Amino acid sequence: MKILSFCLILLCISIQIYSQYSVSNSQLVASYGDTLELSDKSKTPTLFDVRKNSVCIDFLIYFPALGYSRIFPLRENIGIVASANMTPYFEYVYEFSGGVLIGKKNKFFEPQAVYWLRANNFMIKLGYRFQGDKGFVFKLAPAWSFSNNMIAWTLGFGYSFNLGSKKKNY
């Protein structure tokens, strides 16, 4: 319960900090699932313009995890990330995480709360996410485990894409 409260407080603080930024009307043309073309090419692409889905292989110490994540943009530079991973940790362990994505264009700060289903383990990640224009995804984060009381690094590589959109990605 303390972990959930901590994550909600972190989310609220992040939204409050970045709520001062407004989104222009020209960028809110389509729904969340669509990739938007910028009406003014001189503008910097925002979180509404990046690819929303990604498939990644993450490594925690030496355990690989195959996962899927989805970005839900809230503002130009802030969004929510939900992901699910599967890792062969003695037996298959399912990992669910939620977090905040803060940044512009393709460089993001990504704090996340992670729960391992079968291992009954909570972790907090404070990471960096690079999401390239052609779809390449790179993630790096220190992760603190509550049950083991240890810090380990996670490293991830993957590919981002949009479903059903034929518009150009930036």
Image: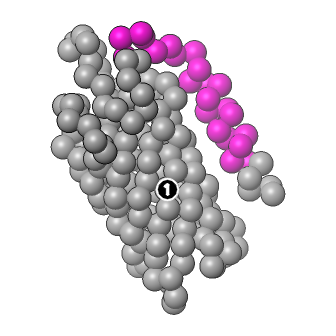
The amino acid type found where label 1 is placed reads Ser
The residue where tag 1 is placed is 83
Which of 63/120 is in front?
Answer: 120
In the rendered image, the vertical position of residue 159 relative to residue 74, given as above or below: below
Left or right: residue 113 versus residue 73 is right
Give the quadrant of the C terminus.
top left
Magenta stretch bounds: 6-27
Residue at 71%, 43% (x, y): give it: 8
**Outermost residue to the front:** 164
Q: Secondary structure beneath disc 1?
A: strand
Q: Is residue 165 visible?
A: yes
Residue at 54%, 78% (x, y): give it: 93
Neighbourhood count class around disc 1 (C-alpha, 10 Å): few under 14, some 14–19, many 20 upward? some
| Residue 159 rendering spot, x and y as whole percentages | 27, 54
Q: Is residue 105 visible?
A: no
Give the quadrant of the N terminus.
bottom right
In the rendered image, the vertical position of residue 65 relative to residue 49, given as above or below: below
Q: How many numbered discs sit on the rendered protein? A: 1
Q: Is residue 15 magenta?
A: yes
